[in-house]
Amino acid sequence: MTLVKDLFSENKEWNQRLVSEVFPTEVAQQILTISPGEGPDKVQWLFNNSKCYDVASGYRISYLFFHEPIDLCPAYMQQRGIWAQLWNLLTPQKITIFLWKYLHGRIPIMQLIHQRFPNTPATCPLCQEESETITHCLFLCQNAKLTWRKIEMEACVPFSNSTTFFDWWSSTTSLLDKQPNGSSKVLLVAILLWHIWKDRNRRVFEQGAGATPPEEIATSVIRAHQEILVRPLRPSRID
Ligand SMILES: [Zn+2]
């Protein structure tokens, strides 16, 4: 059955039995109140008054489809300030996107893979000591821990195992924002997290690659930070 007329009987009246079988009761009742018209079937677009497709109404529908009303999103996603600040960071876009993925927990680390495929190990492939969680990668694995020490960002909220990365990022950025040069410090933290992640990946995926000494990572982070401060980038935000 593909056309409305397929629901008609031979005398061009509704086939009541078929309508009741195909639709829920209340919908069937509404259909049966309509007098079948004479003309041929035609396709109509329901989202504007002209009943013909136009780009404006198509855009509106696709926008609504991809942007859930904010109050239906999980609580952490409703914190607009965090996301606005993230997309306004003057970091290269790859760093902003990396942070966005981390804040949403959408990074293919061993612990997440293990949750979906229990026969894969959850252990950190570098230290083999703990589960490779988001926070283990960025704070607790040996080289990450030493790199944080080298950068001396005491101004950040100390990381504890009981916090999620989202909570840590949200507390740290709001704390740093209240300090002199707060946005520059947030920028430094973002670059630091990216370099720790990049170094991990290199060691995981390049066979035989050794750890970059923490002081070397710290130097690269400070250099990248200085470069951005000297030549500010445009924020990634697209309205
Ligand atoms: Zn580790």
Image: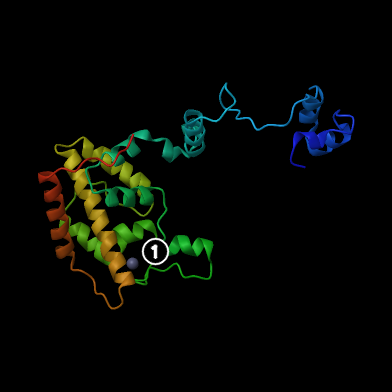
Foreground: 210 or 68? 68
Q: Is 44 situated left or right of 119 in this image?
A: right
Asked which quadrant contains residue 178, the reply is top left
Q: Position of residue 163 (x, y in %)?
A: 37, 49
Hey, which residue is sitting farthest bottom in the picture? 208
Asked which quadrant contains residue 109, the reply is bottom left
- Image vertical order of residue 65 relative to residue 94, above or below: above
Residue drawn where x is 56% and y is 24% of the image: 48
| Quadrant (top left/top right/bottom left/bottom right) for the N terminus | top right
Q: Which residue is mark 1?
A: 132
The kind of secondary structure element at disc 1 is: loop
Q: Position of residue 238 (x, y in %)?
A: 32, 37
Foreground: 232 or 183? 232
Residue 163 in view (yes/no): no
- Image vertical order of residue 94 relative to residue 147, above or below: above
Hey, which residue is sitting farthest left in the picture? 230
| Quadrant (top left/top right/bottom left/bottom right) for the C terminus | top left
Quarter containing ligand 1? bottom left
